[in-house]
Amino acid sequence: MVYVALQVLLCPVLTKNDYEDYHDSRELFSTVLRGDLLSKVFLFIGFSFDDPNIDYILSRIRILLKDNTPKHYCFFKEIDKNSFSDDQDYLYAKIRQDLKIEDLMRYGIHAVLVEDYPVITKILKVIENRVKRKNIFISGAAENYEPFGKEKAEKLIFKLSYKLAEKNYKIISGYGLGIGSLVINGALDFKLNSAYRNLDDLLILRPFPQINPTAEKNTKYREEMISQAGIALFFFGNKKNDVSDTIVDSKGMIEEFDLCVKNNVIPIPIGITGFVSKKLWEKVNKDFSQYYPENSDFIDTLKEINNADVSSDDLISNILKAISLLQKV
């Protein structure tokens, strides 16, 4: 119920007078709730809508906005005929629920009927995955930018980051070697060249700890970062060995790929950038069904992403297309 709040447990809303005085005694809460109902999409779970206070708030919004009421959702369990011994009781309960659903439509609240409550958990998981697919994790490390060359590679990452921000995706970056600053600058450049004000909606930055780093700490850090994403892009994947001073594969990127698979984050290796990314592409290319939803357009686009003959602009367009397709499957 809307009146249950930790701060007011000592002053519960119990009597009719309490309900009538609600909008004066708890005016701030009512105002905040009205604002959220106007600006956000609500999913009501386990809510009966029998509270007169929520009825009042919803009616004010409906009167104010008329036919432009925002769309919200709620779950109802279908009336099960097997739960009734008398047909008349079942019919009464069914009609009552239908009328309740019809009444909620006046306030822009759309009912989703489920056969049983565990179905709600499954639906929420699907919603979570869809929401997270707007968050793009960019994994990359590059001491050596071949076969692209440093200038071409920097322009590629910068422009892709700009385009992702432009299309309202949130970018997650661990500030990888030779990649992280380009990702950040691309998103920042979009912010400076547009009316976008909130940088937190564009970027989640998680630079790795530099004091007393351990493999265990880095793994936990990677997992926390990746758990917020729905799609991951992999670029290059090399670093300089401190002992031999040679270029070696980035083991951190391999671990990030494995963590993505573990956390149901869809990996998109940009194999034409070489090194670890190429190896990851060869791995997913052997069995698309293990890593991707069944969608022929997406698989065709994924193959085109790893076509060495495409230009940087076409590569960016194909990456954006693949991400867009994943929003719908």
Image (cartoon, rainbow, N blue to C red):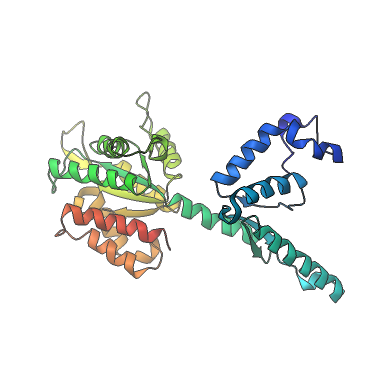
> Where residue 84 sits: x, y (%)?
83, 71
Q: What residue is at 25 percent from the left and 56 percent from the top?
A: 317
Residue 294, located in which quarter of the rendered image?
Answer: bottom left
- Looking at the image, which residue sits at the far bottom? 87
Residue 116 is left or right of residue 172, and the answer is right
| Viewer-closest of 147 and 326 | 326
Q: Is residue 15 visible?
A: no
Residue 291 is left or right of residue 28, and the answer is left
Q: Is residue 238 above or below residue 314?
A: above
> Where residue 263 sits: x, y (%)?
45, 50
Tell me how many marks there are. 0
Q: Is residue 80 above or below residue 21?
A: below
Q: What residue is at 39 percent from the left and 59 percent from the top?
A: 326
Quadrant containing the C terminus is: bottom left
Residue 108, located in which quarter of the rendered image?
Answer: bottom right
| Viewer-closest of 296 and 17 | 17
Q: Is residue 188 visible?
A: yes
Q: What residue is at 35 percent from the left and 54 percent from the top?
A: 267
Residue 76, located in which quarter of the rendered image?
Answer: bottom right
> Where residue 191 sits: x, y (%)?
32, 37
Quadrant containing the N terminus is: top right
Q: What residue is at 20 percent from the left and 46 percent from the top?
A: 156
Residue 266 is left or right of residue 19, and the answer is left
> Where residue 188 sits: x, y (%)?
30, 35
Residue 40 is left or right of residue 241, and the answer is right
| Viewer-closest of 124 and 278 | 124
